[in-house]
Structure formats: structure tokens, C-alpha cells
Image: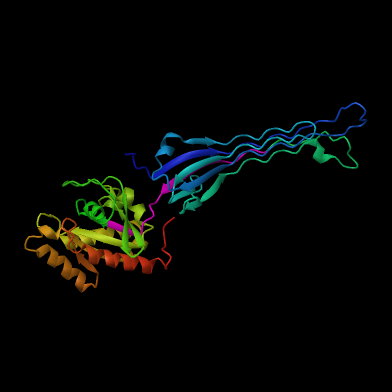
């Protein structure tokens, strides 16, 4: 399995334009042949294109420099130089391309085949033929090609998912996504099992489907860089619905209400728009809830604040159908509303 890489920095350089030629016709029986210097070819450009065949920016970690071909110089007999070949850099769908020096967003590639020119090739210079006129029949001037653009780029990959699963390590997110989709994340009974985001496609009703993103464990202080949550929080910025998953089993050590408050605080501190995103709360592992005091505590808290609450067990599938039905309905409704994302 390839390493998940969601950020990269690369240097791109477009090709220089070819020089125009200074040449004159010298043929037998052709007096005063005149100028025949051709134009130089344009330099190749560098483009970034989104593709569904990639899911990580790993390749850009190993190749950090991309340079397009120079344009060919012009020649005599009005021969124009060949245009330089473009360079196409494939990236995963969901990649945002920034100018690393100005922080300008150059492109947000959200669909397969989306592309953007990130460095434009130089223009080919004009040959002396272009400077001929009635008053200048023997022009000796010509133009050199112009340099191609050069840029330092920063690429950020943000997963495209409808629903984001947020929770403490070992809250049951990976087990849930494995139970409702074909995704097969690593599952174990110790914290931080999930080290990379996982995506799962869920069929809600009929032919309608939605995508769930399992975000690695969030802990208190994640917005300050603690744990893994901060590293992957960007992947829920595009989601339209957040699901807070909280372990209510008898073996859990964290207070369920306090855990929910911490998660809400971390999201709001990282990005205030995330606090306004529609969300629901899911109590997990009810098959080992014991006396159910933790489940009752969290349920009452959500009822008082009119927060939609579900109690589920991914192991026994108890409560899954109702929870998935709610997610599907919410996603279908929210798809008609543009979701504000952070650049």
C-alpha cells in the first residue's frame, strides 16, 4: 500500500521561446531575394491535471522539478521553429494548487480531467521577415524568444467526501466505515490505528450514493498540532455533514459529553466555519455498553440541545440502517446548498 501524502511543493519551469531568424534568400536567378527568416516556436507550458487514477501526492515527493521543452529557433526559407512540448503533471482529484510565494490559489481541481496551466511557455521571437516593409526592404532586426514562467507551487490535497467521521482514537470510525462500505481500513484495539484518511462509498437508497471519510483520531489540542487530527483536519473542510462518533462502551475512559465538547471546540478553533456545519452525534459500541450509563448521559445531553443522536453497534449492525438513512437524506438535501470551504 502506498504512503498517503496530501501536501507537496514542486518547482515548475516553462520552456523558453525560440529565437527568430535573420536570413535572406540567395537563389540563382532571384535578384534581391529579400528577407526569409522564420519565427521561433513558443516554449512548452506546464499543466496540472486531476485524475481519479491517483489518490495521493506521493509521486511529487520524489520528483520536485518539472521543466517544459524550449521552443525551436526559426530558420531560413521562412521555416518556423517547432513549438516546445508541454509537461502534464497528474494529481488526485481534490488537489488545490497554490503559488508558494504569493499564496495565490491557482486552481481547485475537483473533477476528473480538470486542468490548469501553472507556468506558461515563452513566446517565440519574430524572424526578420516580419519586419519587412515598403521603407525597410532589407531588415536585419529579429526578436529573441521570451523566457517561460517559473513558479514554486504548493499542492494541498483535500478529500472529496459528503460525510466526515470525527472522533477520538478507537471511537469505532474504522469499524463503522468497514461495516457500511467496501472500504477495508486497518482495525485494532489500540489508539491511532488509522494513520491515513479512508474513503467509503455508501448506497443510501435506490441509486443514490454518498462518500464517507474516516478522519484519523482527533484529540484535545489537535488545532495546536497534537496527535494526528490537525494533520488531516483539512480533509473535512469539503464535507457537507459531520458525524461525531463517541465510544459509549463500559470500557471507555473518556466522559462522553466532555469528549463531544472537546471535538466541537477543536473544530471551531481550527476553522470557525466547521462549527456551523450540520452535524449529528453517534454513540458507538452499544453491544458492550454495560449498564448503559454513558449512553444515557450522552443521549440526554443531545436531547436537551436538540442534537440528532444515534446509538449503534457496527459489530452487530444494530442502529446502522436508521443512521445511514439519516445521512443519505441529509446529504441529498445539502447537495443543493453550496458548502463554504477554506482556501
* Residue 21 in the image: above or below residue 325: above
69 relative to 298 in the view: left or right? right
Q: Position of residue 256 (x, y in %)?
A: 17, 61
Q: From where the camera sits, is residue 276 visible?
A: no
Q: Position of residue 20 (x, y in %)?
A: 74, 35
Q: Looking at this view, name the residue that lies furthest to the top.
A: 28
Give the quadrant of residue 139: top right
Q: Across the whole image, how many numbered discs are drawn on residues?
A: 0
- Identify the image's colour scheme: rainbow, by chain, secondary structure or one colour: rainbow
Quick check: 138 above or below 251? above
Whether residue 76 is in magenta: the answer is no
- Horizontal and vertical percent for residue 236? 34, 56
Q: In the depicted view, which residue is nearer to us: 161 or 245? A: 161
Q: Is residue 162 magenta?
A: yes
Residue 200, position in %: x, y?
31, 53
Q: In this picture, is 56 found above or below 238?
A: above
Relative side of 97 to 314, left or right: right
Quadrant position of the C terminus in the picture: bottom left
| Residues rendered magenta in the picture | 146-165
Q: Is residue 8 visible?
A: yes
- Would you say 196 lies left or right of 171 here? right
Q: Quadrant of the N terminus?
A: top left
Task: Kindly identify the residue that appears in the image at 62 percent across and 41 percent down.
Answer: 121
Which residue appears farthest toward the front when viewing the image? 206
Q: Nearer the viewer, residue 264 or 89?
A: 89
Amino acid at each position: 500500500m502506498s504512503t498517503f501524502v496530501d501536501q507537496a511543493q514542486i518547482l515548475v519551469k516553462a520552456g523558453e521561446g525560440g529565437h527568430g531568424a535573420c536570413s535572406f534568400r540567395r537563389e540563382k536567378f532571384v535578384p534581391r531575394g529579400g528577407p526569409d527568416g522564420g519565427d521561433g516556436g513558443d516554449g512548452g507550458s506546464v499543466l496540472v491535471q486531476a485524475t481519479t487514477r491517483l489518490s495521493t501526492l506521493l509521486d511529487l515527493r520524489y520528483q520536485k522539478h518539472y521543466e517544459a521543452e524550449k521552443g525551436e529557433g526559426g530558420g531560413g526559407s521562412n521555416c518556423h521553429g517547432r513549438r516546445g512540448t508541454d509537461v502534464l503533471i497528474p494529481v488526485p482529484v481534490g488537489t488545490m494548487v497554490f503559488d508558494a510565494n504569493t499564496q495565490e490559489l491557482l486552481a481547485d481541481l475537483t473533477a476528473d480531467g480538470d486542468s490548469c496551466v501553472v507556468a506558461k511557455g515563452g513566446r517565440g521571437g519574430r524572424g526578420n521577415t516580419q519586419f519587412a516593409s515598403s521603407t525597410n526592404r532589407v531588415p536585419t532586426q529579429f526578436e529573441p524568444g521570451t523566457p517561460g514562467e517559473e513558479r514554486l507551487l504548493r499542492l494541498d490535497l483535500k478529500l472529496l467526501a459528503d460525510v466526515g467521521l470525527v472522533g477520538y482514537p478507537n471511537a469505532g470510525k474504522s469499524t463503522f466505515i468497514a461495516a457500511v462500505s467496501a472500504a477495508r481500513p486497518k482495525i485494532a484495539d489500540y489508539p491511532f490505528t488509522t494513520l491515513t484518511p479512508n474513503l467509503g462509498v455508501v448506497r443510501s437508497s435506490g441509486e443514490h450514493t454518498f462518500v464517507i471519510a474516516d478522519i484519523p483520531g482527533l484529540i484535545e489540542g489537535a488545532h495546536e498540532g497534537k496527535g494526528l487530527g490537525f494533520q488531516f483536519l483539512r480533509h473535512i473542510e469539503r464535507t457537507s455533514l459531520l458525524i461525531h462518533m463517541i465510544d459509549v462502551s463500559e470500557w471507555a475512559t473518556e466522559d462522553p459529553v466532555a469528549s463531544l465538547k472537546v471535538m466541537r471546540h477543536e473544530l471551531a478553533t481550527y476553522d470557525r466555519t466547521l462549527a456551523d456545519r450540520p452535524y449529528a452525534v453517534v454513540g458507538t459500541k452499544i453491544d458492550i455498553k454495560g449498564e448503559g450509563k454513558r449512553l444515557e448521559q450522552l443521549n440526554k445531553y443531545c436531547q436537551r440541545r436538540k442534537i440528532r443522536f444515534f446509538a449503534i453497534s457496527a459489530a452487530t449492525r444494530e442502529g446502522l440502517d436508521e443512521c445511514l438513512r439519516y445521512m443519505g437524506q441529509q446529504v441529498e438535501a445539502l447537495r443543493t446548498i453550496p458548502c463554504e470551504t477554506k482556501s
